[in-house]
């Protein structure tokens, strides 16, 4: 099966063809926002750091931002820096793989207004270049799909997550890749994930990852760790943390785990891949986008509105009430399973088919709403 | 007939109520009523009902995986939750 995508020089394929305008440091956010207002079709990404942090956070932010620049949905990139920051604009443009990339430094460009004018000129030129590119047929095996959940409810683990798991199995059967993240949501299932790994080495790796994360949560939160390491929703029917976490990892489907990635790492294997990310959905999606996910499947029960810049996010409601209450935010109603109107397999098929339609260019609710929050993992102190 | 419960995996010995089920009501999985499976008590949506008797210490399977062990005998049709089952020791590191 094929979708229609944009061929990139590094051998990847995009489902969108955006000009990304990114700040390297928070001080450049004003210029990035101004360029975004002038050119509504570019994807602006601003963030709170790029300076004032230690080497570990510097490494993670560089990997995340560089990964997002190399996301196949990005056709060209303009990085705006201030000049005196730690994470300089050209540290990011240097790692762009075979796509037009320019760095713009505000302190060397005559200040904000002049940099904005120059940025608009560069981004407009990139847009003109990208308009000449045409979509070509690409096998579905070239898709990397991120799996996410947020604002879950008692039905998430019954309807939406298993249905996404069915879609994930289909992508893997087609030769594609799915990335399950949110290590926090795996606590209590280390022994199960271990059994599902393709090799004993990966099994050890996942067991250590989940157990270390459990220790990290206990050490960081102390007496409050029970808020994270708990069934979460006893009133909703979840009786143990293993039961809760199993509901989350259902999104990954049933195929063997082929690789375990660090935060914002890039997969070298196809199939069912796991990434170490926090449970915070915005940070987690940034890790998946940096890994090269062209589409994210996002389950929700309470009704999350969060998409992601440059990456179509498909919202799957676990229940019909939320689907009806938030009609412009939800793309798929897995509540039909609870209503007895559809089977898990049918909704899984619907999610797979919609993903292909979205890959071909159809816009998701979050894209239409321009609901595209951005953040990435930061763990150390600020200096 | 409209189903009111879902069995997620063929290995599971519980079904999940998809709507509130009242005491004495038939539990209908995937549109096929199993005449003998009747809810022994009121069960809220999202909660578990035993498909078969589970002995004390017996494992509760959901998603095809053991998620709990029974702290007393749980009868077929009974609600399964923290009052009659507990987490399996060793599932958590600490």
Image: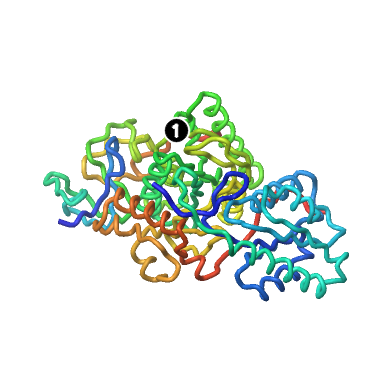
> At which x and y percent is residue A107?
87, 65
> At which x and y percent is residue B39?
20, 49
Question: Is residue A167 at all visible to an observer of this figure?
Answer: yes
Front-most of residues A342 and A292: A292
> At which x and y percent is residue A50?
77, 56
Which residue is the extreme one toward the front? Answer: A132
Which residue is the extreme one toward the left? Answer: B35
Question: Is residue B90 at all visible to an observer of this figure?
Answer: no
- The chain containing the residue under callout 1 comes to A
Colour scheme: rainbow
On the image, numbered disc 1 is attached to which residue?
A256
Tell me if A47 is positioned left or right of A179 in this view.
right
Mark 1 element type: loop
Tell me if A20 is positioned left or right of A203 in this view.
right
> At which x and y percent is residue A256?
44, 33
Crowding at mark 1 (Cα within 10 Å: few <14, some 14-19, many 20+): some
Quarter where residue A214 is shown? top right
* Residue occupying the point 74% across, 70% down: A121
* Residue occupying the point 35% across, 44% down: B83
* Residue occupying the point 62% across, 45% down: A10
Answer above or below: position of B60 versus A354: above
Tell me if A15 is positioned left or right of A162 in this view.
right
Quarter where residue B93 is shown? top right
Front-most of residues A90 and B51: A90
């Amino acid at each position: 099966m094929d979708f229609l995508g944009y061929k990139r020089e590094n051998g990847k394929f995009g489902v969108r063809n955006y000009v990304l305008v990114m700040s390297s440091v928070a001080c450049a956010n004003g210029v990035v926002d101004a360029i975004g207002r002038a050119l509504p079709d570019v994807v602006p990404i601003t963030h709170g750091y790029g300076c004032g942090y230690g080497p570990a956070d510097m490494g993670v932010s560089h990997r995340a931002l560089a990964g997002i620049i190399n996301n196949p949905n990005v056709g060209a990139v303009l990085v705006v820096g201030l000049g005196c920051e730690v994470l300089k604009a050209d540290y990011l443009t240097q790692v762009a793989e075979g796509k037009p990339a320019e760095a713009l430094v505000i302190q060397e460009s005559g200040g904000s207004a002049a940099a904005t004018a120059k940025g608009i000129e560069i981004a407009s030129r990139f847009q003109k270049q990208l308009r000449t590119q045409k979509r070509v047929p690409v096998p579905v095996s070239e898709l990397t799909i991120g799996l996410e959940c947020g604002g879950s409810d008692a039905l998430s683990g019954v309807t939406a997550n298993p249905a996404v798991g069915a879609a994930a199995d289909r992508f893997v059967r087609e030769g594609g890749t799915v990335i399950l993240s949110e290590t926090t949501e795996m606590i209590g299932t280390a022994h199960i994930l271990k059994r599902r790994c393709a090799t004993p080495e990966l099994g050890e790796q996942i067991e250590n990852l989940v157990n270390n994360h459990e220790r990290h949560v206990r050490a960081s939160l102390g007496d409050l760790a029970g808020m994270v390491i708990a069934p979460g929703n006893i009133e909703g029917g979840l009786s143990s943390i293993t039961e809760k976490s199993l509901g989350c990892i259902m999104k990954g489907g049933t195929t063997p785990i082929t690789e375990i990635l660090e935060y914002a790492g890039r997969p070298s294997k196809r199939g069912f891949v796991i990434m170490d990310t926090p449970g915070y959905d915005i940070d987690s999606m940034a890790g998946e986008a940096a890994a090269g996910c062209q589409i994210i499947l996002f389950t929700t029960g309470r009704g999350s509105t969060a998409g992601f810049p440059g990456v179509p996010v498909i919202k799957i409601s676990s229940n019909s009430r939320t689907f009806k209450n938030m009609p412009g935010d939800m793309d798929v109603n897995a509540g039909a399973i609870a209503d007895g109107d559809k089977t898990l397999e049918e909704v899984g098929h619907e999610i797979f088919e919609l993903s292909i339609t979205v890959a071909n260019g159809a816009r998701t609710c979050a894209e239409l709403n321009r609901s595209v929050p951005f953040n990435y993992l930061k763990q150390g102190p600020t200096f | 007939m409209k189903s009111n419960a879902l069995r997620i995996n063929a290995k599971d010995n519980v079904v999940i109520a998809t709507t509130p089920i009242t005491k004495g009501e038939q539990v209908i999985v995937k549109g096929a009523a199993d005449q003998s499976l009747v809810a022994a008590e009121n069960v809220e949506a999202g909660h578990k009902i035993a498909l078969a008797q589970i002995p004390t210490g017996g494992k509760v399977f959901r998603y095809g995986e053991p998620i709990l062990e029974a702290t007393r005998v749980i009868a077929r049709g009974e609600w399964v939750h923290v009052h009659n089952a507990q987490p399996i020791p060793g599932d958590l590191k600490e």
